[in-house]
Image (cartoon, coloured by chain):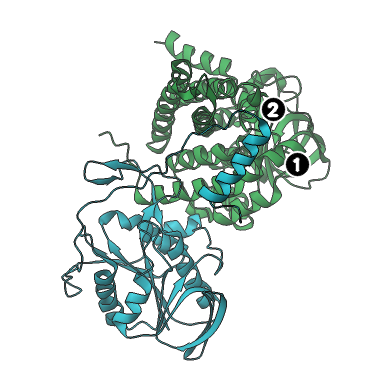
Chain colours: A green, B cyan
Amino acid sequence: MIDFSLSDEQKQIRSLARQFAREVIAPQAARFDREESFPEEITARAAELGLLNVGIPGSAGGLGLSMIDEVVIGEELAWGCMGIYSILMASELGVTPILIGGNAEQHERFLGRLSRGGGLAAFALSEPDNGSDAAAMKTRADFDGDDVVLNGTKMWITNGGIADLTVVFATYAPEERHRGVVAVVVEKGAAGLSHQKIYGKLGQRAAHTAELVFDGVRVPRANVLGEPGDGFRIAMRTLDRTRIPVAAGSVGVARRALDEATSYAGERHAFGQPIFDFQAIQFKLADMKIGIETARLQTWYAAWLVDSGLPHTEASAIAKTYASDIAFDAANEALHVHGGYGYVDEYPVAKLLRDVKLNQIYEGTNEIQRVVIARGLRNR
Amino acid sequence: MKIVAILKQVPDAEARLRDGADGVDLGGVTFVIDGMDEYGVEEALRLREGGADGEIVALALGPRRYEEAIRTALAMGVDRAIHVETDENLDPISQARVLASVIDGEGADLVFVGGKQADWDSSALGPAVAEALGWPHSDWTTRVEVRGGTLSVTHDADEGTEDLELPLPAVVTTQQGLNEPRYPTLPNIMKAKRKELRKSSLADAGGAEPFTRLLGQSLELRERRNVILTGDPSEAARELVRRLRDEAKVLAK
């Protein structure tokens, strides 16, 4: 059975997300990009509308939306601003390990709190000296009676320090590499937890990215997700899933790039005709369209696998890699279609390119995704 | 108090419309609830939030695709909906008779409807519904207040605004400035699916005889003149001012 249609309810959800992106996010995106400031009001508004932490199940007070719902929303919001969408996406990334590895009590205590209070979550895996090679992490977790004590530094953490809850991955046995990792939930304001906002990012400047420092942060053992030693598996299973919204966001950026380029190509004249009428331009626009449609199909497919409870590691790696690559190309070509105007901030296309570069890097670089895809080939 | 909000579904304001073989080609067009009607839905919700007890019913007359617009109203907070489903192209007067018969059957006290319809730009529906019901009406309304059995409103008149008082039941046509419609929230979108959407037909409403017959439709296209003024700059400027004044009539004489 193959069916690409959205339900009436999904169409409503898409139309809400589209309207929110068009009327609330897009008009303010340039300002938050320029000021490198956090769009507090927009995030609060998104939470009020139910666009934040949509994956929290009904049993914990959430909406329990499917992955398909989430990618439909993600594409629309990222059309408005990838940086602002990353705030919501990163919160979903923080929620997911709790969903995957948490018990019923933790679901209620952590996710219930998020769905009632509208707060953000965060996911802390990367460190200053390691990213793709996550098993090389240095942040320590030491078990002390009923507590876990954390020491170390996490890097590039979206919503880091401003999130109500942060899922932290730390090692209690570095020599065991990935088998010695524990996932633990740290609440905002924990003693010994501090953060430093990272300024000077190329793009996605509305998103708050921070370095998180753990200096003897003590949390109850009841905050450990699964068993000690499950941490690495929880992190990888989380990313297998949350890469799909990165793909959706990339499709949104690519669609925005095509919209901007198409509209500019219709207005701008050269040699007595709109530049749209030149095949050199038409081919660029057609290639963008090809990328958008095919990337969306793969994104929906990967999301459908998740919703169907089927293996999705490879499909999500393909979706994330392909969608972010075509989106980068689309933004690059859209900028080119704008000529000199594309190179300044008067038009939104320069920001699209700056923003979408990150989609090829975060939640597993596209190189790591290709390694994952190739690993599947070797085992055949 | 029972409030009925009449609504239509129209092409999105950013939709690109084209002439097709049989009238306007609506293929690939995104449809939305008519913005003018949305003010009515919002106002009904606000009246209730302001303390008015009772039920809010969305009412639509049109083809099957209207369902999406109806769901939007349900997601905004309307309690239930009635959809008189038809593919027939009815003029506003015959539409008004059908709608009036449903409203009468519902025993409504107050009806909201957009001041004009965004698709074919008629301003007739609201007044025609009031006429068919024999109720008073206020058009182009920008303020609504219910005081017991009377309605106090402000509406646009030819040379300014008027404050009116009218007895309920009444019809109010809405417009920009009345309020800022809310977004339907995600939880409400999910709840809307469980709300009643009653389907009805023209026959249920006593049938409809169109007063006018549609022969064809086409879009009015605005074509650019593509005139470039050349030559001496001050001459060209004078010519531009003359054209703006005499042809475009955007400058006063």
- Name of the residue lying farthest toward the top: A378
Q: Chain of mark 2?
A: A
Residue under the image location 42 percent in, 49 percent down: B12
Q: Is residue A296 above or below residue B29?
A: above
Q: Is residue A161 left or right of residue B165?
A: right
Name the residue type under label 1.
Answer: Ser
**Could you say whether the residue bearing mark 1 is in a helix, strand or loop?**
loop
Q: Is residue A234 left or right of residue B206?
A: right
Residue under the image location 37 percent in, 56 percent down: B119
Q: Which residue is mark 1?
A: A37
Q: Is residue A321 above or below residue A239?
A: above
Rendering quarter of residue B202: bottom left
Q: Is residue B248 visible?
A: no
Q: Which residue is mark 2?
A: A344
Rendering quarter of residue A168: top right
Packing grade of label 1 (10 A; few <14, some 14-19, many >=20) is some
Q: Chain of mark 1?
A: A
Q: CA distance from mark 2 to mark 1?
A: 20 Å
**Could you say whether the residue bearing mark 2 is in a helix, strand or loop?**
loop
Q: Position of residue B244 (x, y in %)?
A: 57, 47
Q: Position of residue A55 (x, y in %)?
A: 51, 45
Q: Nearer the viewer, residue A308 or A197?
A: A197
Q: Is residue A56 left or right of residue A308?
A: right
Name the residue type under label 2.
Answer: Val
